[in-house]
Image: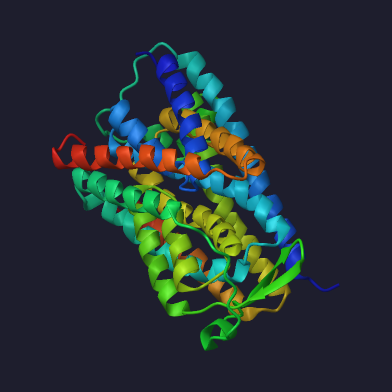
Amino acid sequence: MTVIVFTLIILIGSYFAGLLGSLTGLGGGVVIIPLLTLILNVDIHYAIGASLVSVIATSSGSAAAYVKEGITNMRLGMFLEIATTAGAMCGAILAVYVPTHYIAILFGVILLCSALLSLRKKAEQIVTEKSYLAKKLKLNSCYPTSTGSVQYSVRNVGGGFFMMIFAGVVSGLLGIGSGALKVIAMDTIMRIPFKVSTTTSNFMIGVTASASAVVYLQRGYISPGLVMPVVIGVLFGAFTGSKILVHTKSSGWLRWVFAIVVSFLAGQMIYNGIVGKI
Amino acid sequence: MKFKDTDIQSLIGKVLRGGMMLSMTVVIFGGIFFIYRHGHSIPNYKVFKGIPPFLQNIGSLIHASISFKGQAIIQLGIILLIATPILRVVFSTIGFALEKDYLYVGISILVLLIIFASMMSGHAG
């Protein structure tokens, strides 16, 4: 296989990875890593490097739109970025010492959990009771809706912060955005409205990934010839996905199909990790 | 003139979008050169062996980009892409300073310091 054929295959594959990642809300990274390692036999370190760069591209692209609409809670994002960047730094350092087959198994497990979580029903919740820490840190805010501005409060700041450290470690170790974990921290623990938690998570993913990408860059994990088609493909795929999401309202069965595909990939990663092929 | 959250938000939106567009343009530009020069060689990513040394030193990277080496131009684009969210934090810091929200100036600087520490840890190994 020559470079030109290889690049074209990755470009097309990454496009679908970006599309799938955007439609499931899992992000492009979780699909691109199995594609590169399982199908194209790329070393997992190169795959993680390429995925991380594509995660930054999609985060910057989509966060720009949400920030302008004023839904993103920038103070909350910045405060939690202390946790995610510190976690990402630890994850990236750990990645050097953890054997690749353990990385593959952990990747599969996280992917499986994320797929299950993406199926769960999302009910909008507004909490108004004031927490001391949230007030001190000016985290309580409001966001615009069609019926006017909605006020909300933030609960359990400590718990959310702790979960974000974990999300950061996973992101740095596996080269994914770990958006699912970030949304759990904000949705389930801190009780933030769903719309705010998803956009703020997206906003934070770029900085989190950058904190570990600076390590990967120096370790030679980011190989330009491979990253180029991955980042272009994922970005265009994610863009198409965001267009489709706007047009289709009831995508219930679509989510199930995706969850099954992603679970299959997760199983393959775990299996290949156990038998030591990765 | 008083700075409000909304002013900073629109500025940050512009930084993110601009950085992403610029770096992707550089990556695609470099990609064309890369394919043109190496399109018919055989890629090997099966075994991890890092990247060529000329891509790891910023001086030689710029030098190679000027002489239109595709991989070097792509790598520059990637560095710009990685720098975009970090630049966003820098702009947020300035924004919080203009709002006189010193708690968040401190928090933003702490985030920047962590990223800097991460950069140093990669350098040491």
Residue at coordinates 33% horizontally, 61% vertically from top-left?
A: A90
Residue A140, placed above or below residue A123: below
Is residue A241 left or right of A183 when viewed as pictured? right
Residue A5, placed above or below residue A189: above
Residue B34, placed above or below residue A75: above
Residue furthest toward the top?
B40
Q: Quadrant of residue A169?
A: bottom left
Is residue A19 left or right of A48 when viewed as pictured? right
Coloration mode: rainbow
Q: Quadrant of residue B108?
A: bottom right
Is residue A17 left or right of A198 when viewed as pictured? left
Residue A119, placed above or below residue B36: below
Comparing A18 with A168, the one in front is A18
Picture coordinates of residue A48 (x, y %)?
36, 42
Residue furthest toward the bottom?
A132
Comparing A57 with B73, the one in front is A57
Residue A63 showing in the rendered view:
yes
Is residue A227 left or right of A90 when viewed as pictured? right
Residue at coordinates 61% horizontally, 80% vertically from top-left?
A: A138
Residue at coordinates 58% horizontally, 45% vertically from top-left?
A: A250
Residue furthest toward the right?
B1
Picture coordinates of residue A96 (x, y %)?
26, 50
Q: Quadrant of residue A33?
A: top left
